[in-house]
């Protein structure tokens, strides 16, 4: 028998040799064994992966990394077997062997999941697809954690409703033009609603061909680590590449709707995480909602600006436009576009714009120096901004019609665009200097994207006497956490600001409980905080009394907070949010606990670990400095294991804006 087995193996190896193949397969990994580099396709260095259009709630990462680089001009999921020393083409998750794979995602709010797309191939299975089944379980934690439970699905029911070729081949640098591994896109029907939190998908595939099915990992050129997925081959373990021993993730797409109707923050819609001056979601359809704060800058088309507190953006619609007023809140569904460097959202037609409410307060301008603005003009694109003590130093004030002039504070100079669709050109040139309010704008002719920055005033009333801008309080919030009240507030500008009296009302009148020093005169953003440790159960009201050096004062709005008696596990929203570059994360522990606090990006990849230690019961504050990471949306997740056996997990979203 041993002799027969040896003869059989010899025959198999001979066939592989004759065919010139360099692949080894067991039921766990489909592996490249050769390191010859035959890949010579010209890679476009400016290409970047974008999520498909539609109701995509979550995209775990790119299934390919070389567009058009595969067999017959198809897209290619290239294994960098020579360049990076990686060897794993695919991970086994086949029903026949009992193998499974798992990967996680973060639901940022309540999600109704309609379907999920997974990717798999069977070597030499060909086209059309040979995938016959996919079963799926959704866990509320890692499937290897005994405290995790299945919240949807089971390990046997076939929930696949569609399988088709994805237009992608999986191949190595040794055989980059191989068509042996045609990757199939497999859609499973889900139909469940999940609250916000971190979940794990655990799935398994079956097919009619002899090999696999195999799951190709996320493909990113130059990257050996692409995620934190798991593989089950008798026990759960990290899904590691066989050559580099680095953790891998699996591409998948989650389709459905969010509780907010799929509305995302404007800052997320226009984000540019790779800092290439092009929005990452260029060409994608998004839904945003914000308050109109400009006139229509077009006569025959629509060009309004809206702001939702996280960012501002231009809404552009070709053709006869609907009319909106200042303070109208509109919901816009349209394609992210770019015109001469300016990011826009372009609805397909007027049905993509829905009036939600009227009479809303307008955003306050962010007061800057010209130096502040010119240091990072992309950060203020589409936002209402203001400059103090400006003088026109170039160009001619228009007497009817549009014009571009130059303004200066004596140090720096900036273009200012006076648009004929405003009332500005119908009025006389003001007496300089002036404080000027306008929109951070861009017109980079010739197709460039990193120049042409300018100020776009909206009305003649945006020109104000010098020194008009006062202390600008942009936020004031109160949060109760385990017997204390945390007060946080932010100013965008300050003028002669001595400081803030913190006043509290419980049952009678407001009384002063503390004082926080101000920053005098400043055009920079300042964050302030105060902790009220002397509270009982009940409802409290707080306000700030902002006091100038000359004794003048004004009160902030009143904020309300309820203090609850029981001490619970909780995770507060970070403050400030959005932030740059530092923010504070506050959480409370009901009992002494083993705590981990981690930061993740939108792909679910860990950015950093802030805490991994034993902490005592009570309120804890952690400072997070994001100076070394790019702008964008991030998530912070806490996991606490109490000494009494209590398990606590929560996740929240935060926005870094640089």
Image (spheres, rainbow, N blue to C red):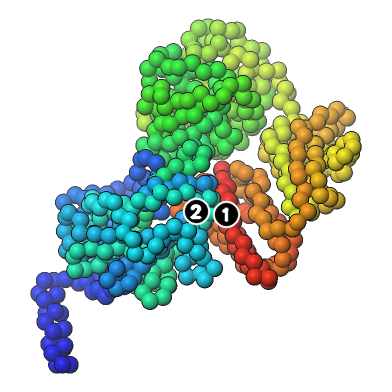
Measure the alpha-carbon separation of dots 2 and 1.
Answer: 8 Å
- Residue 33 shows in the view: no
Residue 571: horizontal and vertical position, in percent? 65, 54
SS under mark 1:
strand
For image coordinates 62% across by 62% down, the residue present is: 648
- Residue 169 shows in the view: yes
Q: Are marks 2 and 1 in contact (CB under 8 Å)?
A: yes
For image coordinates 40% across by 49% down, the residue present is: 191
Which quadrant would the C terminus be assigned to in this image? top right
Which quadrant would the N terminus be assigned to in this image? bottom left
Residue holding disc 2 = 106
Residue holding disc 1 = 651
SS under mark 2:
strand
For image coordinates 51% across by 69% down, the residue present is: 145
In depth, the one of 392 and 596 nearer the eye is 596
> For this view, does 610 lie left or right of residue 94?
right
Residue 516: horizontal and vertical position, in percent? 82, 43
For image coordinates 64% across by 25% down, the residue present is: 361
Quadrant of the rendered image containing residue 525: top right
Residue 142: horizontal and vertical position, in percent? 48, 65
> For this view, does 106 lie left or right of residue 464?
left
> For this view, does 607 lie left or right of residue 203?
right
């Amino acid at each position: 028998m041993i002799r027969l087995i040896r003869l059989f193996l010899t025959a198999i190896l001979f066939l592989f040799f004759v065919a010139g193949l360099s692949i080894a397969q067991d039921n766990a990994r489909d592996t490249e064994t050769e390191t010859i580099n035959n890949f010579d396709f010209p890679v476009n260095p400016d290409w970047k992966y974008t999520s498909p259009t539609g109701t995509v709630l979550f995209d775990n990462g790119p299934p390919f990394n070389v567009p058009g680089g595969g067999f017959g001009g198809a897209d290619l999921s290239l294994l960098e077997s020579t360049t990076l020393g990686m060897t794993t083409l695919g991970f086994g998750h086949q029903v026949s062997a009992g193998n499974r794979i798992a990967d996680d995602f973060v639901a940022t709010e309540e999600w109704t999941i309609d379907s999920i797309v997974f990717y798999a191939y069977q070597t030499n299975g060909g086209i059309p697809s040979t995938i016959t089944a996919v079963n799926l379980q959704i866990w509320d934690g890692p499937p290897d954690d005994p405290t995790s439970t299945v919240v949807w699905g089971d390990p046997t029911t076939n929930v696949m409703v569609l399988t088709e070729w994805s237009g992608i081949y999986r191949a190595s640098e040794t055989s980059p033009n191989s068509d042996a591994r045609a990757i199939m896109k497999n859609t499973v029907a889900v139909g469940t609603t999940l609250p916000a939190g971190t979940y794990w998908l655990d799935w398994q595939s079956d097919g009619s061909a002899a090999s696999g099915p195999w799951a190709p990992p996320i493909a990113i050129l130059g990257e050996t680590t692409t995620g934190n997925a798991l593989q089950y081959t008798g026990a759960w373990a990290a899904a590691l590449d066989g050559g580099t021993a680095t953790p891998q993730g699996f591409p998948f797409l989650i389709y459905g709707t969010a509780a907010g109707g799929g509305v995302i923050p404007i800052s997320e819609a226009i984000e540019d995480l790779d800092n290439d001056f092009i929005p990452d979601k260029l060409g994608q359809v998004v839904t945003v909602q914000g308050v109109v704060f400009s006139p229509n800058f077009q006569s025959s088309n629509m060009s309004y600006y809206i702001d939702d507190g996280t960012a501002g953006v231009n809404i552009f619609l070709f053709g006869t436009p609907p009319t909106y007023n200042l303070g109208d809140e509109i919901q816009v569904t349209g394609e992210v576009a770019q015109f001469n460097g300016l990011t826009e959202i372009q609805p397909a037609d007027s049905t993509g714009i829905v009036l939600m409410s009227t009479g809303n307060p307008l955003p306050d301008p962010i007061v800057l120096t010209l130096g502040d603005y010119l240091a990072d003009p992309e950060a203020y694109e589409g936002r209402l901004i203001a400059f103090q003590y400006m003088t026109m130093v170039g160009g001619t004030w228009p007497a009817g019609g549009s014009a571009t002039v130059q303004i200066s504070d004596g140090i720096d100079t900036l273009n200012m665009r006076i648009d004929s669709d405003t009332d500005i050109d119908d009025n006389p040139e003001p007496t300089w200097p002036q404080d000027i309010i306008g929109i951070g704008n861009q017109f980079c002719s010739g197709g460039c994207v990193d120049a042409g920055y300018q100020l776009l005033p909206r009305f003649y009333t945006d020109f104000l006497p010098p020194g008009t801008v006062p202390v600008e309080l942009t936020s004031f919030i109160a949060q109760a956490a385990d017997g204390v009240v945390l007060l946080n507030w932010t100013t965008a500008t300050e003028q002669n600001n001595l400081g803030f009296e913190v006043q509290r009302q419980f049952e009678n009148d407001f009384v002063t409980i503390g004082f926080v020093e101000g920053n005098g005169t400043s055009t920079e953003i300042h964050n302030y905080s105060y902790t009220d440790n002397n509270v009982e159960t009940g409802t409290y009201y707080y306000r700030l009394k902002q006091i100038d050096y000359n004794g003048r004062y004004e009160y902030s709005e009143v904020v309300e907070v309820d203090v609850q008696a029981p001490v619970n596990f909780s995770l507060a929203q970070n403050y400030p949010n959005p932030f740059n570059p530092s923010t504070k994360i506050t959480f409370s522990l009901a009992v002494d606990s083993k705590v981990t606090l981690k930061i993740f990006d939108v792909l679910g990849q860990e950015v950093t670990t802030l805490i991994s230690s034993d902490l005592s019961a009570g309120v804890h504050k952690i400072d997070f400095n994001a100076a070394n990471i790019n702008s964008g949306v991030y998530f912070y997740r806490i996991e606490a294991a109490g000494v009494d056996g209590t398990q606590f997990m929560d996740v929240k979203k935060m926005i870094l804006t640089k």
